[in-house]
Amino acid sequence: MTIEELPARSPVAGLRRRGLSMVEVLAQSVSALAPSAAVVAVPPFVMVQAGAATLPVLVVGSALVALVGWCLTAFARRMAAVGGVYSFTAKGLGPGGALLAGWALVVGYAGIAVSALVGTVAYAISFTVPFTGARPPGWVAALLAVAVGLVATLTTVRGIRLSARVALALEVVSLGVVVVVLGVLLAAHDGSTGTGAAVVDGPVTAGGVATGLVLAVAAFMGFESAATLGVEARRPLVAVPRAVFWTPVVTGVLFVAAGLAQVVLLRAAPVEVLTGDVPVAQLADADGLGVLPRLLDVGIALSFFACVTGSVNALARVLFSMSREGVLPAALGRTHPRFATPSVALAFVLPVVVAVPAVALAGGARARDVLAGSLTLSALGYVLAYVLAAAAMPLFLRRIGELTRPALVGGAVAAALSAAVLVVAVAGASWSGSGAVVVVFVLAWLPGPVLWLVLRRRAPDVLARVGVYDQATASSVLPGQGVRR
Amino acid sequence: MTGVDRGVTGRQPQAVRSALAVLEEVARAGAGVNAKEVAEALGLPPATTYRLLNLLVAEEYLVRLPDLHGFALGAKVAGLVGTAPPARVPTAARQVLAELRGGVRAGVHLVLVSGAAVRCADVDPDLPLAAPALVETHLHASAVGHLVLAEAGDWRDVVHHPDRLPALTPATPTRSVELEACLARVHAVGWAGQVGQLHEGVGCLAVPVRAPDGQLVGAVAVSSGRGEVPVASLDAARDCAARLGPLLG
């Protein structure tokens, strides 16, 4: 395409362009990752699997995610996309790879939104139990899920500005509570050992380490979601790569530090606490910290709620992108006339995200089971998308003639390691221990490959459009400049 | 977050020199030049060149073309040249303006427009604009500015801080909803009018001057201190703008 043929209008017009500051873009990644929930909930799971190798596993998992984040910055510095990792993959692996990765991402975002919604409900109930004295029946939990879903709908349709700011504030508050709780517990720690030591310093097996690594990587899911704000960010080619790289790096440091604290604390605790629902809260309760455990519940419930809005924001924008390309019906690409958000896509996504957990909870399913199942489902989706995106990065750079040796090595290592993580996760040695989740994932992911095969036969021109981004328009280049001959 | 990952600091003069050299090379080679060609022409290491190109694209001095490997100078470069093009108005155009000035009892001004740059080129000597500089810089608050913003694909790309539009008077549209309502009116009727948005009690209308190919090259503005849009002069201003089009475009 020559400079004279540049379009007057961006293919992703309709969203509010260039409005979000650096902090708001960062908030999207942070809220979808939900660091305070991750650093509290995940390390005990890893301990059960990896035993004495827990800390090295946490470090390696964080490093792998940071490496994937670095791979994504190669795209984010060069194109401002709405589809995030989906659009990136299209530029390296073509439309086929993009649809495989894109639909895996859709499953990932939807799964994490469901599990975060359940998490919000579970921690909100855990907060009220000491006051009411009894666990409420399933239909109350289901009603609560619907209410949380309604609030999430309002904030996400109203605009990413409000939801991002609220989410970041909630996250900072809850991280503060987590740090205070862990700090107080460490200060009160007397260096004794309890029955938990048998697990914390337990034997190291290859399978346990691999499964622990899967769990550690899963803690970071959603860190890449700032990449869906390419159009809405004020300086997208600066803000998005920073958010995508620094979110996992900073969270990784917190994650390892919180892991270290929990290794020390849980070694001294009874083994029942370690394998319980919320080990840190139980430790805090046992230490008689008064109001702090309740604050921890509220903080983590808020963190989960921020995660619901963050994931739904990203999910709706991926569908919006697919719709603008013609892969999905055009209606999903409509934006709200006043708030300039992908409101139709949001309205399509949110009922699904709310209905699944509401029905399950009303039916008497345990929150912990729904949470674990949807988390596993989304982990499979995310990691598949990460594998494809990391593999796409060197191919993309080679295509545009900007490949360097570090990029080639980094992309290859990230793709290979993520693929290994995916294989372990699929192998079913994962924490949920059931093959049913893998079957559900394959069924949920099937529309991706099917769309690709159908479009390849019926509408190759639609496939050629896959990977739209906020490209240069006639008004963004200097008029009247010379053209290379 | 700040303070880290800043590719270039003031302590790295060579990096600044290299960035400017990259900018010059894209200007010299022409739109469509790719990263390898820039690196080879300048003798810079490829990885450094790619990083500098990405920085210049992030700051919008350069633009990545839709093939993702070609580069072109960004519209922002116009800001380096100065937003004010030399305001030479042809004599024939001055005569057309003089005729309009003789026919209406309000200030008649010619404003030249180039992209988003606005220049008050011929201000009525008898009833001058109170502050031409305000018209040139606050596009959201003037009738001429509304014409320019309505012409742009997205007004947010044109104004400097779309989320912090300064209020010059209580009537200035500072919220995007208000401004968008003004722009919608411009789209509907083909001319712009405002009262008291730039100065209290001053009304103004602006009629686009279009080159024969339809491009917006200027505006005829009629200002009045009577606190209303001088619609009585609308037809005369339109007639004047139609005659100016071929002279300016």
Image (cartoon, rainbow, N blue to C red):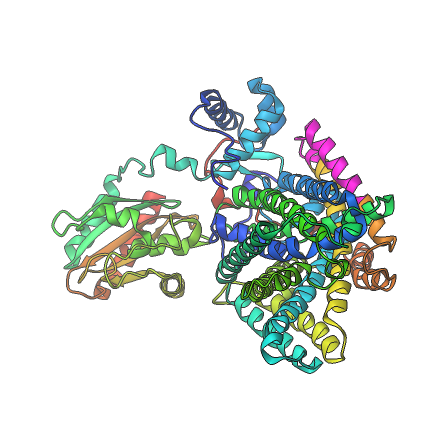
Magenta region's main secondary structure? helix
Q: Give the tally of numbered discs.
A: 0
Q: Does residue B187 appear to the left or right of A140 in the view shown?
A: left
Name the foreground residue: B96 vs B31.
B31
Q: Where is residue A297 in the image (x, y as percent from the top left)?
A: 59, 65
Name the foreground residue: A191 vs A483.
A191
Q: Residue at x 28, y 62 (%)?
A: B193
**Residue A296 position by quadrant:** bottom right
In the displayed structure, A485 sits above or below B212; it is above
In the displayed structure, A132 sits above or below A154; it is below
**Quadrant position of the C terminus of chain A in the picture:** top right
Q: What stretch is highlighted in magenta?
A: A397-419
Q: Position of residue A216 (x, y in %)?
A: 72, 49
**Residue B117 position by quadrant:** top left
The answer to whether residue A243 is seen in the rendering is: yes
Identity of the residue furthest to the left in this view = B126
Q: Position of residue B109 (x, y in %)?
A: 22, 50
Identity of the residue furthest to the top in this view = B43
**Quadrant position of the N terminus of chain A in the picture:** top right
Q: Does residue A440 appear to the left or right of A246 in the view shown?
A: right
Q: Which residue is drawn at 44% across and 21% down?
A: B13
The answer to whether residue A463 is seen in the rendering is: no
Q: Does residue A208 appear to the left or right of B106 in the view shown?
A: right
Q: Does the magenta stretch include residue A464?
A: no
Q: Is residue A398 magenta?
A: yes
Q: Which residue is drawn at 40% across and 56% down?
A: B150
Q: Position of residue A120 (x, y in %)?
A: 63, 68
